[in-house]
Amino acid sequence: MTTYLDIALIIISLALTASVILQNKGVGLGGLTGADSTQVFSARRGLEKTLFNITIGLSVIFFILTILTIALR
């Protein structure tokens, strides 16, 4: 059972990493490190909002799977 949870954690972590990187698509390489502070914040619409919600969902699933893996060991 824990083997399946470990595999699921790896898959979810890769998807979570990809979704976070995709959110910084238009910021540039300096934005990944936090160097670009001149960005104007605006409301999320369309694909940005969907990607943001997917990231939140993946993080919740990752948290639940982590707690479940620790509880079963």
Image (cartoon, helix red, strand yellow):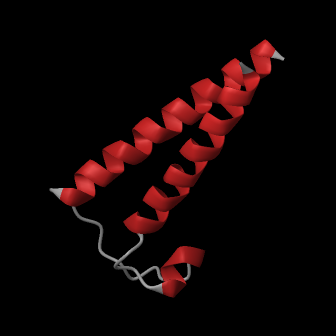
Where is residue 72 drawn, in percent x and y? 77, 14
Which residue is outermost to the top? 72
Q: Give left or right: position of 31 versus 13.
A: left
Which residue is outermost to the right? 73
Name the quarter where the N terminus is drawn.
Answer: top right
Which residue is outermost to the left? 46
Residue drawn at (66%, 28%) of the image: 4
Q: Give left or right: position of 42 versus 37.
A: left
Where is residue 64 drawn, in percent x and y? 59, 24
Name the quarter where the C terminus is drawn.
Answer: top right
- Of the pair 2 and 41, the residue shown nearer to us: 2
- Of the pair 14 and 26, the residue shown nearer to us: 14
Task: Identify whether 14 is placed above or below 39.
Answer: above
Task: Identify whether 62 is placed above or below 72.
Answer: below
Residue drawn at (39%, 83%) of the image: 38
Q: How many marks?
A: 0
Residue drawn at (34%, 50%) of the image: 52
Residue drawn at (76%, 14%) of the image: 71
Task: Identify whether 27 is placed above or below 54.
Answer: below
Q: Is residue 43 visible?
A: no
Where is residue 8 drawn, in percent x and y? 60, 35
- Of the pair 33 and 6, the residue shown nearer to us: 6
Where is residue 62 drawn, in percent x and y? 58, 35
Q: Is residue 40 visible?
A: yes
Q: Give left or right: position of 19 versus 65.
A: left
Res 2 → quadrant: top right
Q: Give left or right: position of 70 versus 20.
A: right
